[in-house]
Image (cartoon, rainbow, N blue to C red):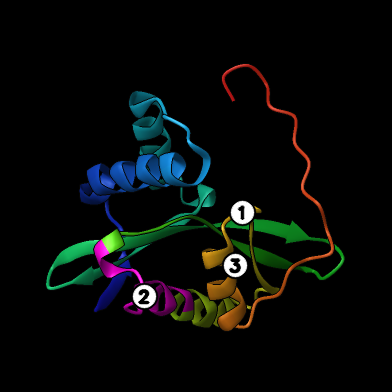
């Protein structure tokens, strides 16, 4: 498997992965046009993050998005892993572990203070994977207030 930065040529597969992940984990049908604009916006402004993809024999089989959160307490950035998706045919075959190792190494090299992600409470398979990779559940609970269109 090969890992690389995603490019604008990957927008279609990233949109498909994000839509599949939302349906699979939350039962949500995302607006594809809006999702496409959101994915493309990452490529238009690097401050929004960066996608990494994993390929098997030239086919993109998994992806994730890295975004950044400044921590004044630590004087460093947390790197957030978001929009994780691996094709069902490649789950359990090391695709996510390879992506995670790649991101962890890059975060360490960049001086990040750590990695964070959020996971659905009922997604125990993903939680076990994250724990196996050395992550632990945070003591924080996540709250949100969505605005119109959010």
Instruction: Specify whether 49 is left or right of 71.
Output: left
Q: In which quarter of the image is the N terminus?
A: bottom left
Instruction: Specify whether 88 is left or right of 48.
Output: left
Residue at the image position 32 percent from the left and 62 percent from the top:
62
How far apart are labels 2 and 1 at the CA level?
19 Å
How far apart are labels 1 and 3 at the CA level?
9 Å
Residue interval drawn in magenta: 89-100
Dominant secondary structure (helix, strand or loop) of the stretch shown in magenta: helix
Closer to the observer: label 1 or label 3? 1
The local secondary structure at tag 2 comes to loop
- Which is nearer the N-term, disc 2 or disc 1? 2
Q: Quadrant of the C terminus?
A: top right
Residue 11 position (above or below residue 109):
above
Q: Position of residue 81 (x, y in %)?
A: 55, 61
Q: Nearer the viewer, residue 52 or 124?
A: 124
Residue 28 falls inside the magenta stretch: no
Residue 97 falls inside the magenta stretch: yes
Disc 1 target residue: 122
Quadrant location of residue 89? Answer: bottom left
Disc 2 target residue: 92
- Which is nearer the N-term, disc 1 or disc 3? 1
> Are the two marked residues, 3 and 2, in contact with CB atoms closer than 8 angstroms?
no
Q: Position of residue 58 (x, y in %)?
A: 13, 68
Q: Nearer the viewer, residue 98 or 4?
A: 98
Q: Position of residue 3 (x, y in %)?
A: 30, 74
- Which is nearer the N-term, disc 3 or disc 2? 2
Disc 3 target residue: 127
Q: How crowded is mark 1: few (under 14 residues within 10 Å), some or many (20 or more)?
A: few
């Amino acid at each position: 498997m090969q890992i690389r930065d995603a490019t604008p040529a990957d927008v279609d597969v990233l949109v498909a992965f994000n839509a599949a992940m939302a349906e699979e984990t939350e039962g949500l049908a995302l607006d594809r046009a809006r999702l496409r604009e959101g994915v493309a916006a990452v490529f238009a402004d690097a401050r929004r993050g960066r996608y990494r993809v994993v390929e098997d024999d030239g086919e993109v089989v998994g992806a994730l998005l890295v975004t950044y959160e400044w921590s004044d307490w630590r004087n460093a950035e947390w790197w957030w892993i978001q929009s994780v998706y691996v094709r069902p045919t490649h789950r359990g075959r090391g695709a996510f572990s390879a992506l995670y190792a790649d991101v962890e190494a890059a975060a360490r090299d960049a001086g990040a203070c750590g990695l964070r992600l959020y996971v659905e409470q009922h997604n125990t398979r993903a939680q076990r994977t994250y724990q196996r990779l050395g992550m632990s559940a945070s003591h924080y609970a996540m709250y949100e207030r969505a605005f119109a269109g959010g």
